[in-house]
Image (cartoon, grey):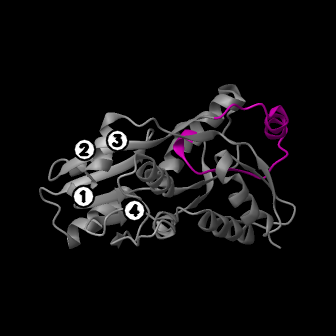
Amino acid sequence: MILQGKVFISTVSIHKSVEIRNIFEQLGATVVDFPMTELLAVEQTPAIQKAIWQIEKFQWIIFTSANGVRYFHRLLKEIGKVSKIPSGVKIAAVGVKTALELENNGRKADYSGTKNTAENLVDELLEKESLQNCNILLPLGNLAPDTLHTRLSKIANVTRIDVYKAIKAQVAANDTIERIKNNRYDLVLFTSPSGVDNFADAIGHENINPELRVASIGKVTACAVEQHGLTCLVTSAKSTYEGLADEIVNYYTINK
C-alpha cells in the first residue's frame, strides 16, 4: 500500500475522527488524532424558532455543509412543527457530502453544485433559476463568513440562522505536539480554516515554521494555511475525506 508507514496528524473534529481515520488506515497509514474543533448544537433563539415555524414561506434553502444539514434537521425535530423539509421548498447543496446527508434525512437536493464552494453553487444556480425576490434560508455554522448572505441579499430576501457552533477543542495532547516538533510525522491534515487557526494556537505560533508539512481540503482552508506562512503540499479540490486521500496517494505516488 502506497501509504504504508506514513503518519498523518488529523485535526478534524472529534465526531469526525473515526471516519477520516478509517479511510487512511485502509490505505496503510497511521492516523494520530489531534482534534482542533468541537461542534455543538445552538440554543433555540427566537430567530431560529421563527424560521422553522415559517419554513413553508421559503422558496429555497441553501446548505453549505453536511453539518448544517444535520443540525438543521435536529432543530426541525426539536421545535416540532415538521420533522422534514416540506416538499414545496427547494433545496440546494454544496458538495457531495452535503447532498448525501440530505438524502439521509429524507430529501434529495433540487440542485447540487458541480464544484465545492458556496460561491460557485450560487453562480450555477443563478444560471438556471431566477432567485429575484425569493425567500431564501441559509442554515450555517457560527464561523461561516457572511459572503453568501451579502451577495444573495442584493436580489433576494435572505434569512441566515446559525444552526451549530464550532468551538476550539480542549487540547491536552502534548505527545502529539512533541511529535510535530521532533518531525515524527508525514502530514498534518486540515479540513477547515478554524482548524488551522486553532492548531497554530495549540502548538504555539513560535513552532509554526515553513517546513511544516500540510495537506488541506479546499481553497479556503489552503488560504488559511498560507496566512500562517505555510504551503500546502497537497490540496484537494473535492470537499471530502476520500478526495483528500486520493490527492495524498497521488502525491506520494509521484514523490516516492
Mark 2 near mark 4, Cβ–Cβ under 8 Å? no
Q: CA distance from mark 2 to mark 1?
A: 23 Å
**Mark 2 crowdedness (10 Å alpha carbons): few <14, some 14-19, many ≥20:** few
* Disc 4 residue crowd, few under 14, some 14–19, many 20+, Cα 10 Å: some
> Residue at the location (61% across, 40% down)?
38
Residue 48 is labelled as: 3
- Asked if residue 2 shows in the view, the reply is yes
Span colored in magenta: 169-194
Q: Nearer the viewer, mark 2 or mark 4?
A: 4
State the mark number for residue 56. 1
Which secondary structure lies at badge 1? helix
Residue 169 placed where, x, y %? 65, 34
Q: Residue placed at 33% from the left, 72% from the top? A: 110
- Name the residue beneath numbered marker 4: 84
In the rendered image, residue 55, in percent from the top left (x then y), is placed at: 28, 54
Residue depth check, mark 3 versus mark 2: number of the one nearer the observer: 3
Residue 255 relative to residue 5: left or right: left
Residue type at mark 1 is Glu
